[in-house]
Image (cartoon, rainbow, N blue to C red):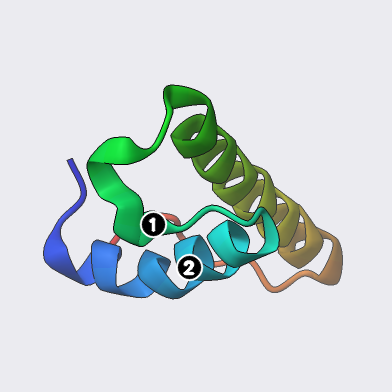
Amino acid sequence: MANNSTKRVLQPLKDQIARELNVNLANGPSLTTAQVGHVGGQMVKRMIDTYEGSITAGTTTSMRG
């Protein structure tokens, strides 16, 4: 499970993706598994894309916190 600082860093990404997918995170328990999975899947995709981009640019840093 993510620690609080990690959650704080990832929250803006989660909110942005949810908005783009028209998923209202305030609906919490009413969200479907598909909605939550889609947001999470897109978060992972963006993080991988960002990391791969940093490798190409030669600006990688350790993934350890």
- How far from the left and from the top, in percent, is residue 57? 83, 71
Q: What residue is drawn where x is 66% and y is 47%?
A: 48
Residue bearing the label numbered 1:
25
Q: What residue is drawn where x is 21% and y is 49%?
A: 2
In the image: residue 8, left or right of residue 50: left
- How far from the left and from the top, in percent, is residue 26? 32, 61
In the image: residue 28, left or right of residue 55: left
Vertical order, 31 against 3 (above or below) = above
Answer yes or no: do the residues labelled 1 and 2 have beta carbons within 8 Å?
Answer: yes
Which kind of residue does numbered mark 2 sit on?
Asp
* Other-residue count near label 2 (Cα within 10 Å), few / some / many at <14 / 14–19 / ≥20: some
Rendering quarter of residue 29: top left
Rendering quarter of residue 16: bottom right
* Other-residue count near label 1 (Cα within 10 Å), few / some / many at <14 / 14–19 / ≥20: some
Rendering quarter of residue 33: top left
- Label located before the other in sequence (1 or 2): 2
- How far from the left and from the top, in percent, is residue 3? 15, 57
Would residue 11 be visible to someone looking at this image? yes
Query: Which one is closest to the eye, mark 1 or mark 2?
Result: 1
> Split into 4 quadrants, where in the image is the C terminus?
bottom left
Would residue 64 be visible to someone looking at this image? no
Question: Looking at this rendering, what residue extends furthest in the top direction?
Answer: 33
Residue bearing the label numbered 2:
15
